[in-house]
Image (cartoon, rainbow, N blue to C red):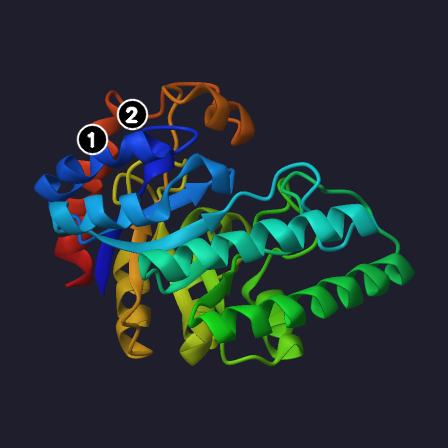
């Protein structure tokens, strides 16, 4: 398992100039970096790849930022906007040699309401239809799509491993896998380790985050059981620290981070990495 860090801990948006962070991530001991690309125009993918190569750091994943107007279950315009955006990220991933586009690649984050069953079926069909198209595009580019269930406060569409597996199977593409996150699972799953085992071969990406969005290991999550579950399914993908702080204001607001969770944000990365190395390897 490679261990990575999501750049949202340090900046939003990530732009080409922020590749200066790569040397620090490498010095701390990370194998990979995860890049949330809020707008494809923010980066020069060839330059970003060159800087990562120079730092000796792999770009393990590109994270879809499904903001307003990007919604595969929304209006025709929103569906088209989401498709153009996600295809652009896949293009950039291919240029950078990145294996996976990850995240809630189905709907705008924050859309959470009591949807009637009939409407749920309509929205489900729209997402499946659109993601089949996107999956075919990703296959042609040699990129995987790893779909992330979010907690109930961030979406009403996909909350659990079971729902995620249902969507993966409905799309039916070898390029589509599941992406699980300990923060969301802490809210939605009865047993995180059991969910990981259930995901099995379909698990393509994994986020490690404290139960309070803080440092992995400094919380009440059953990390030893999670480690055993990942090893039991032969998981070889990336495990990425995705935590947020009040230092990055726009992300703090989006993720409802209203207080300083850790004394220093560097500790989330450095201490979290040390814990994951000790626990997962």
Position of 238 with respect to 14 (left or right) is left
Crowd around label 1: few <14 · some 14–19 · many ≥20 (10 Å): few
From this view, report whether residue 12 is shown above or below residue 135. Answer: above
Q: Please tell me whether residue 244 is drawn above or below residue 229 in the rendered image.
A: above
Mark 2 surroundings within 10 Å by alpha-carbon count, few (fewer than 14), some (14 through 19), many (20 or more): some
Q: What residue is rendered at 18% in x and 57% in y?
A: 279
Front-most of residues 229 and 95: 95
Residue 177 screen position, x and y as percent = 49, 71
Quarter holding the N terminus is bottom left
Asked if labels 2 and 1 touch by Cβ distance under 8 angstroms, the answer is: yes
Quadrant assignment, res 227: bottom left
Residue 276: give x, y in percent of width and height. 20, 52
As drawn, the residue found furthest toward the left would be 27
Residue lying at 36% horizontally and 47% vertically, measured from the top left: 45
Which residue is disc 2 drawn over?
262
Q: Is residue 238 visible?
A: yes
Give coordinates of residue 275: x percent, y percent: 17, 48
200 and 81: which one is in front?
A: 81
* Residue at image point 73% right, 52% down: 80
Q: Which residue is mark 1?
A: 267
Give the alpha-carbon distance from disc 1 to disc 2, as whole Å. Answer: 8 Å
Figure quadrant of residue 113: top right
Above or below for 78 versus 250: below
Residue 193 visible somewhere in the drawing: no
Indicate which disc, 1 or 2, sits on the residue closer to the N terminus: 2
Residue 249 placement (x, y as % from top left)? 45, 19
Q: Residue at x 72, y 62 (%)?
A: 127
């Amino acid at each position: 398992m490679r261990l990575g860090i999501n750049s949202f801990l340090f900046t939003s948006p990530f732009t080409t100039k922020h590749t200066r962070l790569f040397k620090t991530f490498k010095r701390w001991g990370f194998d990979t970096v995860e890049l949330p690309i809020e707008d494809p125009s923010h980066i020069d993918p060839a330059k970003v790849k060159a800087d990562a190569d120079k730092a000796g750091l792999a770009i393990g994943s590109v994270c879809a930022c499904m903001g307003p107007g990007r919604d595969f279950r929304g209006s025709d315009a929103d569906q088209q906007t989401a498709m153009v955006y996600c295809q652009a990220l896949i293009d950039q991933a291919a240029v950078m040699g990145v294996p996976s586009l990850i995240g809630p690649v189905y709907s705008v984050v924050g859309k959470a309401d009591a949807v009637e069953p009939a409407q749920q079926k309509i929205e489900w069909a729209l997402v499946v239809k659109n993601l089949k198209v996107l999956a075919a595009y990703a296959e042609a580019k040699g990129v995987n799509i790893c779909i992330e269930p979010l907690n109930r406060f961030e979406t009403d569409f996909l909350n659990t491993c079971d729902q995620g597996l249902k969507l993966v199977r409905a799309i039916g593409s070898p390029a589509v896998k599941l992406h699980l996150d300990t923060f969301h699972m802490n809210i939605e799953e009865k047993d995180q380790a059991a969910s990981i085992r259930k995901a099995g071969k379909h698990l393509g990406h994994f986020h490690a985050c404290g139960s309070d969005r803080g440092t992995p290991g400094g919380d009440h999550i059953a990390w030893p059981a999670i480690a055993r579950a990942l090893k039991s399914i032969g998981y070889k993908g990336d495990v990425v620290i995705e935590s947020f702080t009040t230092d990055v204001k726009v992300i703090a607001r989006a993720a409802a981070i209203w207080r300083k969770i850790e004394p220093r944000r560097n500790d989330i990365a450095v201490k979290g990495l040390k814990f994951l190395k000790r626990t997962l390897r």
